[in-house]
Each structure stands twice: as C-alpha cells, then as structure tokens.
Image (spheres, grey):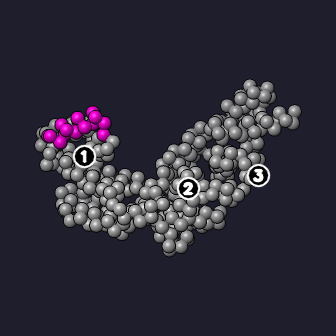
Amino acid sequence: MVVRSKSSNIESITGLINDNSTLPRIAKRLQRVFNTTGSKSSIDRWKAEKAESLDIREIIKRLNFSGILCVDEYKPKRYKGYDLIDSDALTGRILYLEKAEGLGRGIVKEHFEKLKDLGITPYAIIFDMRSCFAGTARKVFGKDILIQHDYFHVMKIIHYHLNRAMAEYRRLLKESGIETLDIWSARWIILKNIEDWSYKHHQIMEGILKRYRGTLIEDILILKQGIRDIFLESNNMREAFFRRDELLKEGWQFKSQHFAKIIKFLSSPYFKYMVTYLDHPQIPKSGNSENVIRLWRQMEKVRYGFKTGKGRLNHLKLYQFYHYLNGKLD
C-alpha cells in the first residue's frame, strides 16, 4: 500500500510537470492506473510538498549556467503587471522568474540583485530594447558586463516602422485614386527576408517590383536589406559601425518620416549594444526568449494562470528538476 501510494504520488507530480496536465486529469489517471483515487487537493498537496523539498539555489547550481543570461518580460494571466523571466541564452533553460509590478529601474535592480543572491552571475546579458535594463545591469553585475540587445527585438522595431511607411504610401496612393490591393496582399512578403521567399513569393514580388520600381516600395526592400547586412554581413563591431554610417549618408531619413525614425533608432547610443555579438562570437545575437516565454505560457494556459507567486515558483522548480535534471540532484 505504501509502494502504491508513493508510486501514485510520483505519477501525479510527473504528470503535472512532464505532460503539462491538470489536477482533474491526473486524478482520473490515478484511478485508471493504480485503481485508487486522489482528490485535486491531495494531488496539489503532493506537488507542493515535493516542490518545497527542492532548493532553487541547488537547482540553479546543477543547471551549470553558461554565464550568458537572457532576460525578458511578459504579461502573465491572473494579475496585472509583468513576470521577469530569466533563461540561459545558450541552453534555453529557464533559470528563474519573478513577478514585477512594473519595469522601473528600481524593480529591475531588485530583480537582478535577487539573481545575484541565487548564484546567477552573468558575464553577458541579452535583453530587449527597454532602457531600464542596460544601466541597471551594470550597477548590479559590474561595469564590464557585456550587453547585447536581442536581434529579434531590434528587427521587430525596424519592421514596425517599415510597415508604417508602407501603410502611409498606400494611403497616399488611395487618396489619388490608385488601387493598392496588390501591396496590401504582399505586405508580409515585402517585409519577409528574401532568403525565406518561396517560389510563389518570388513570382508575386516580380509583379510588385515591375509596377512599383523607383517608389517607396522598392526603397523599403533596399533599406531593409541594407540594415540586415549591417548585422549579418559585418565581421566585427567596427565594420558594423562603418556600414551603419554609410547607410546614414544615403539620406534615407529624407524619404519618409518612418525611415527617419529608423535612422534615429540606428543612430542612438544603444547601437553598440545591438552589435556586441560581432566582437564576442560566443554571445548569440538573440537570446531565444520568445521560445522560452511560449513554453511557460503553455504551462500557464492549462492552469488559467498561477494563483500565487509561490505556486508559480514551485511549478518552475519541479519543471527544472524533472525536465532538465531528470529527477536527480546528485
């Protein structure tokens, strides 16, 4: 009976974590597999007892952190505010997460100090373009820490302004009585990387370029590729700055107010953080945080969000223990 009880406890916890299942489903599984019942409250208690027997510091130590931290924020279910989620940029493993009432420098500083207290001391950090991160990271982890703005977020900002430029151009054409349905239909192809175009995409774009050669549509394609070359074709930071400066000399800011915003963005003091990876090839240009957040959201979704911060951290510890460490701390 003791063996059956222990087995059912393990089955409950691993089912909740590895299968991302729910308490009612696990209760039914216990009845089917072990011919025993387990109320939702009992299963929840077993989960909490196991989680609280695990030390988050010991887990983090066993995860062998690479030293390159990725920090991102997302809005969880059940409460207003954010969760700050921290992962290893090389392995993609979630290291820690914490509720944040906002993203002010004071809150971010407290979060970084918590990471340091847990033994997470990075030599490089990857994060998005929020201004609260860079200076705060240097204050907590030291002025020599390497900072990389996530390439995914950099290009997301670029694409936003390119899309706005395209929308404004379409509006001007429509006001002149010119039909622009072809631009609307091809807008995502225009913003898509050329190497990712399918044969059908190439056929569509041949027609688009034939009609709009010498217009803002062609300019969008040229500017987008010029920006991508800065990040993908440069061999080091010095070359990236040179390519950036050459792009600025071409006068793109005078062609569209949205192009001007892109040029201003690339001219900011933060540009150096966008190209850190070029002089430090061990640092990826993106931290893969979108996949990490997507993974955590899947765990949230089946539970309609975590009710408490303690419950959220308990679930993380169990996920780390069973998924990353195969249920062993030795």
Of badges 1 and 3, nearer the viewer stands 3
Q: Which mark is residue 88?
A: 2
Q: Inspect the image, locate mark 3, and give the three-letter code of the amino acid beneath it.
A: Ser
Of badges 3 and 2, nearer the viewer stands 2
Magenta segment boundaries in residue numbering: 197-211
Q: Which mark is residue 167?
A: 1
Determine the secondary structure under disc 3.
Answer: loop
Task: Identify the residue at horizontal 12%, vertical 43% (top origin).
Answer: 176
328 and 147: which is toward the camera: 328
Q: Which mark is residue 53?
A: 3
77 and 210: which is toward the camera: 210
Q: Majority secondary structure of the magenta segment?
A: helix
Task: Identify the residue at horizontal 43%, vertical 57% (top origin).
Answer: 285
Q: Inspect the image, locate mark 1, and give the three-letter code of the amino acid beneath it.
A: Ala
Q: Is residue 210 magenta?
A: yes
Per the model, the C-alpha gap separating discs 3 and 2 is 24 Å
Task: Identify the residue at horizontal 77%, vertical 47% (top origin).
Answer: 49
Q: Is residue 56 visible?
A: no
